[in-house]
């Protein structure tokens, strides 16, 4: 299987997996809207799929070709060309690092030498020069012009901005085995941010279109993107169902801006834009990273600090902002925007773990692992590696969010059941002191019966059979629903056709079919429907 076939298969696989995961996430979100609590079991299944998908995407990314990266070039001060566009003189060249090349407000010529061992021999794919730069460029191979990206010029008014990414085809007819010479003319008058050197990537690899090259590079990132989108939907549903919506919005908002950051990152592989717009993209990545970190730090402070929350949050935010402003390079700024807040969060959760705070230890371990993985590979920051780490960190937060929501709902249900039982005791006491009497119509006359004497009521179309303690039964000309509205709180609806006086209940048993049976002190048995069974069990304590 050749490289292009592998990438085609990988793209199909990951898009399929991404669509599947988005569908599962939407289904889970809708399910949560109609359920009493989140399904933790379903969450485990989803997280398993996430880990497997991440593992496969790493393997796919590892199958890419090994390009020849160019890290040093020569800056030439004396270059001339003839009327046909062929270079006639390239002199006064000095070797510098590629990061030192910065045309700023001028025109710069750089020179690169490279060898091609199999020049002149048939090859499966032609070679290409990958040039990613915030600059307009013209490229010459062995003195012959092979392409142009925009139009470099001495003055800004004459420059035509080139694309941020360009791959120049290196014709086999111009290549020789040793000492091939690349000369690049470039200018960069229209940069929005003068932070990093304009040349970001210069390498020789198999030729393909710029969009295909960047799509292959960013393709594995679509799975972390799907994870974050699923998590945003899932955690947003939980937050709006929660009693404390404001506090529970920290994780959904953080995941939303993580999605925005990741979309801004991969937009380079989706859209072919001119280099001035790259500054907007970089600012979006930096601002999104700051917002993600601040919201995660807010979540940690709110959850694990009982006092001085605002002080800790303010110190973390101010320290991070000052560091971002003082650092020189864009990647260093973005790295600081993540590591400082997450490092402070690690200290807070670690201290809370020492104090035996609930769930503090798992949070401390997760944040420490994230900080360690990110800090140990700073050169891979803002690359696929980082987004795997951030996706796994958010998987942990999503899981904790679901667990907290489930516990919150269980506590809420417990408190509600306790309040209902207390109210029922008060109602029973009131009923004993002042029994409620209801008016019934039967046999052409009207009688009043004390509710404390009614054992249970059984619906029979337009009539209700009232079973009275030690007095048999009476037919009441009314519907069961209308009668229910007149009965005191000591009566409980247990079936579509039955209402029971709880004062006569002695026990509740469950049948093999899942329905229940109430045993009364009178010796009667009343069925309980499967749907109402949990409510009856909670009501009886």
Image (spheres, rainbow, N blue to C red):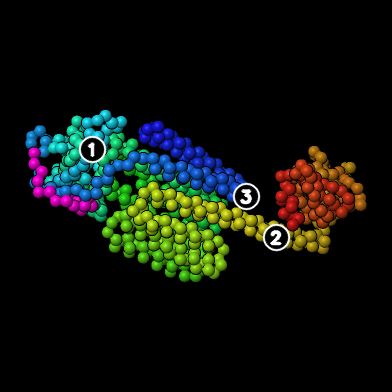
Residue 361 image point, x, y percent: 53, 62
Q: Quadrant of residue 541?
A: bottom right
**Secondary structure found at label 3:** loop
Is 53 colored magenta in this rendering?
A: no
With respect to residue 198, does 15 lie above or below?
above
Q: Which residue is mark 1?
A: 116
Badge 2 density bin: few <14, some 14–19, many ≥20, Cα 10 Å: some
**Residue 108 visible in image:** no
Is residue 537 among what the camera can see? yes
> 397 or 233: nearer the eye?
397
Q: Is residue 98 magenta?
A: yes
Q: CA distance from mark 2 to mark 1?
A: 81 Å
In front of the other: 121 or 213:
121
Please give the name of the residue rendered at 88% of the width and 45% of the height, measured from the top-left corner.
Answer: 474
Mark 2 or mark 3, which is nearer the start of the sequence?
A: 3
Please tell me which residue lies in front, 210 or 315. Answer: 210
Instruction: Identify the residue at horizontal 17%, vertical 40% (top origin).
Output: 179
Q: Nearer the viewer, mark 2 or mark 1?
A: 1
Magenta segment? 88-103
| Residue 418 numbered tag | 2
Label 3, on which residue?
A: 36
Q: Main secondary structure of the magenta part?
A: strand
């Amino acid at each position: 299987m050749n490289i292009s076939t592998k990438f085609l298969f990988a793209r199909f696989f990951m898009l399929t997996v991404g669509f599947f995961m988005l569908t599962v996430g939407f289904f889970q979100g809708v399910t949560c809207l109609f359920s009493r609590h989140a399904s933790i079991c379903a969450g485990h299944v989803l997280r398993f799929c996430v880990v497997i998908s991440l593992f496969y995407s790493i393997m796919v990314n590892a199958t890419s070709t090994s390009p020849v990266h160019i890290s040093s070039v020569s800056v030439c001060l004396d270059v001339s060309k003839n009327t046909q566009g062929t270079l006639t003189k390239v002199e006064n060249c000095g070797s510098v690092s590629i990061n030192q090349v910065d045309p700023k407000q001028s025109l710069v010529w750089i020179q690169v030498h490279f060898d091609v061992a199999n020049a002149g021999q048939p090859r499966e794919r032609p070679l290409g020069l990958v040039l990613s730069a915030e600059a307009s460029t013209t490229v010459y191979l062995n003195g012959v012009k092979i392409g142009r990206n925009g139009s470099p010029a001495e003055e800004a008014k004459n420059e035509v901005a080139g694309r941020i990414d360009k791959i120049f085809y290196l014709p086999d007819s111009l290549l020789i085995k040793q000492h091939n010479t690349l000369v690049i003319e470039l200018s960069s008058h229209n940069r929005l941010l003068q932070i990093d050197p304009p040349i970001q990537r210069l390498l020789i690899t198999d030729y393909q279109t710029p969009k295909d090259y960047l799509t292959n590079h960013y393709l594995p990132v679509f799975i972390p993107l799907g994870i974050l989108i699923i998590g945003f939907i899932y955690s947003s549903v939980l937050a709006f169902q929660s009693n404390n919506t404001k506090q529970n919005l920290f994780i959904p908002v953080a995941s939303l801006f993580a999605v925005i950051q990741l979309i801004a990152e991969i937009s380079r592989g989706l859209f072919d834009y001119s280099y001035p717009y790259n500054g907007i993209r970089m600012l979006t990545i930096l601002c999104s990273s700051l917002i993600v970190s601040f919201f995660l730090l807010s979540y940690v402070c709110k959850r694990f600090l009982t006092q001085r929350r605002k002080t800790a949050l303010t110190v973390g935010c101010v320290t991070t902002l000052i560091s971002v402003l003082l650092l020189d390079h864009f990647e260093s700024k973005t790295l600081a925007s993540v590591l400082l807040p997450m490092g402070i969060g690690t200290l807070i959760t670690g201290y809370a773990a020492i104090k035996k705070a609930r769930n503090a230890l798992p949070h401390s371990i997760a944040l420490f692992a994230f900080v360690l993985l990110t800090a140990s590979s700073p050169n891979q920051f803002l690359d696929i590696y980082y987004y795997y780490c951030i996706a796994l960190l958010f998987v942990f937060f999503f899981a904790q969010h679901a667990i907290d929501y489930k516990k919150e709902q269980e506590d809420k249900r417990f408190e509600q059941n306790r309040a209902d039982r207390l109210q029922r005791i008060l109602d029973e006491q009131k009923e004993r002191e002042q029994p409620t009497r209801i008016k019934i119509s039967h046999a052409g006359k009207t009688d009043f019966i004390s509710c404390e004497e009614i054992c249970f009521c059984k619906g029979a179309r337009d009539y209700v059979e009232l079973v009275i303690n030690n007095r048999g039964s009476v037919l009441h000309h009314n519907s069961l629903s209308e009668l229910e509205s007149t009965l005191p709180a000591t009566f409980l609806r247990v079936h579509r056709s039955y209402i029971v006086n709880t004062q006569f209940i002695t026990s509740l048993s469950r049948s093999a079919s899942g329905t229940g049976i109430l045993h009364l002190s009178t010796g009667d048995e009343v069925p309980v429907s499967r749907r109402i069974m949990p409510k009856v069990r909670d009501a009886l304590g």
